[in-house]
Amino acid sequence: MLNFVFSKIQAMTKQKKVEFVINKLNDIYPEIPVPLDHKDPYTLLIAVLLSAQSTDVRVNQITPLLFKRADNPYDMVKLSVEEIREIIKPVGLSPMKSKGIHGLSHILIDKHDGKVPKTYEDLEALPAVGHKTAAVVLSQAFGIPAFPVDTHIHRLMYRWNLSNGKNVVQTEKDAKRLFPKALWNRLHLQIIWYGREYSPARGWDLEKDIITKTIGRKSVIKDYYKKTRKKS
C-alpha cells in the first residue's frame, strides 16, 4: 500500500504538485475569512503585532477592548504604556507589545501623518514589527503581493516537499518561487486555514489530509504510518 502511495507521489512533477495544491485549496476554500478582526490598516497592524506567540481567537477577544479606547494612533498615544499593557495582558508578551504599540503609534504620527506605510522598509522600522507582520499588513491591508510565512505554512511546505524546512526565510523564498505572484495573498491564507483544519502539528490525521496524502514528502508519510502502527 505504502509503495503504491509513494509511486503516485514520485510520478508527479513539482509543477503538478503546485497545481494540485492550488486547485485543492480553491475547492476547499472558495471564500477565505481573514483570521484577525480589523477595520483598517492601523487596527490590522496592531492585531497582527498582538498575535505573536498567541492565538487569533485570543487576539480577537482582546482587540475590541483596546480599540474601544483607541483605534487610531492619535488616541493610542494618549494612553500610557501601562494602560495598554493592562488591556492586552491576556495575549501574552504584554510588556514588549505595549511598548511597541505605543512607540509605533508615535512614529506613525511623527513620520507618516498618522497613516500605516506601504513598504517593507518603513513597516519593519517600526518597533515590534518584524518581516512577517509587515508582510501580513502589505498583503491584507493594501493588497500588495506578499507571502507571510507562519508556523502552519512552514510546516505544510515541508510536509508537501515544497521546501526543505530549514527556516522561514527559505520557506518564503520557495513559496514565492513556486506559486504565481497573483495568488500569493489568497494562497497564504488558504494554506493557514488548511493547516489548522486538516494538517495540524498535533492530532494530525493523514487520512483527512488529502494534500499531504497525495503529494507529501516520503519520509513524513513513512514516519506517520510508523507512529500510527505503534499506537495500534
Image (tube, helix red, strand yellow):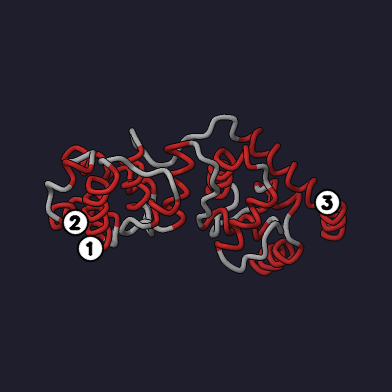
Residue at left offset 30%, top offset 58%: 127
Query: Badges 1 and 2: C-beta atoms under 8 Å apart?
Result: yes
Tell me the amino acid under the disc marked 2. Arg
- Side of 45 relative to 180 (left or right): left
Q: Position of residue 181 (x, y in %)?
A: 63, 42
Mark closer to the chain start, 1 or 2? 2
Work out which quarter of the rendered image holds the C terminus and state it: bottom right
Q: Label 1: few (<14), some or many (≥20) within 10 Å?
A: some
Tell me the amino acid under the disc marked 1. Pro
In whole angstroms, how far apart are the C-alphas of marks 3 and 1? 48 Å
Tell me the amino acid under the disc marked 3. Thr
Q: What residue does disc 1 label?
A: 95
Question: Looking at the image, which is closer to me, 217 or 169?
Answer: 169
Residue at left offset 59%, top offset 59%: 155
Q: Position of residue 113 (x, y in %)?
A: 26, 41
Q: What residue does disc 3 label?
A: 13
Question: Looking at the image, which is closer to me, 111 or 166?
Answer: 111
- Name the secondary structure under disc 1: helix
Q: What residue does disc 2 label?
A: 85
Query: How many tags in the picture?
Result: 3
